[in-house]
Amino acid sequence: MPVELSTSNGERLTASSAERLTRNEQAHPERRRAYWRKYWHSLPLEQRRRRARQKTATQTPEQREAKRVASRKWRQRQGAEYRQRHAQQARAYYRAHPYSSLSEETKARLRAANRRWKDRHGAEYRERHNQKQQERYRANPEKYRQLAKKYRLALPLEERQRRARQNKLITKYGIRPEWYEEKLKEQGNACAICREPFISNGQRRVAEIDHKKGTKKVRGLLCHSCNWAIYKIDQDPAWAQRAMAYLRAFA
């Protein structure tokens, strides 16, 4: 009695027909791959991603690494034309699905995947990436300046002001914003000399950073008046004595 098998569309096959089908697939592997590629791309994108995640979850780390190496070699064999086409498709997809429109679960998964990728490649990747970025900037600095300006102008005014203050702390004084907040708490949110609070009757006074002129050595946070007085004393130590003598003369 012949053994009966069935295909995906429900057709009945005998054992001899199944063997013939297997031989045809072995004789024409490219035809079989093209068939499955066509079937795979006919599926909805979310379904393809779900199946890929399910398959990856069942693989061992060695299998996943072997798959990554094989994919990398395959992409290298395709040449620059394939990479350019793939980059255009990726850009079109990301324009249609911006990061802000993704769910929190998807964002968390992407962040975790990026972290794993960076950890796997380590410092060597970061150094290579930074070097390429610097080369691109040196080749066309005006383009990157315009992009940075366009990005800044798209931000809300408060966010631009906050980032400007942070950049000033880092570039001019060499301190992090966290240090500034910790110093405010340490001084009781008041000037280190006159002890006047930086917030009084709902009015916020600027906490100026006192540092040694000519260096980035930061000493503390002062109000404008005390910071100006310290500056004068730094420039001319006898200034304080003359100021005291002047006050005594009119006491």
Image: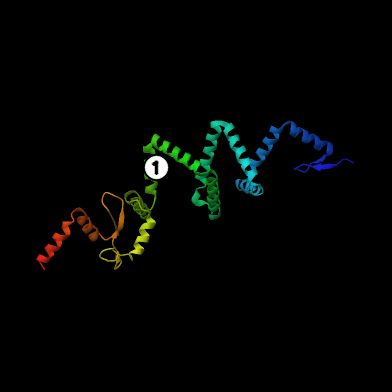
Q: In this view, does 3 lie above or below 155?
A: above
Residue 169 location (% of width, % of height): 34, 52
Count the numbered circles shown. Answer: 1
67 or 170: nearer the eye?
170
Residue 36 in view here: yes
Question: Which residue is found at the position 53% from the left and 55% from the top?
Answer: 104
Q: In this view, does 218 lie to the left or right of 31?
A: left
**Depth check: 53 or 235 in front?**
235
Give the image location of residue 205, x and y in percent: 28, 62
Which residue is disc 1 drawn over? Answer: 147
- Element under label 1? helix
Rendered residue at 56%/31% (across/down) = 79
Report the amino acid beneath label 1.
Answer: Leu
Residue 54: x and y in percent read 65, 49
Does residue 84 sit above or below 231 in this rendering?
A: above
Query: In the rendered view, does 131 fall on the left or right side of 187?
Result: right
Q: Quadrant of the N terminus?
A: top right
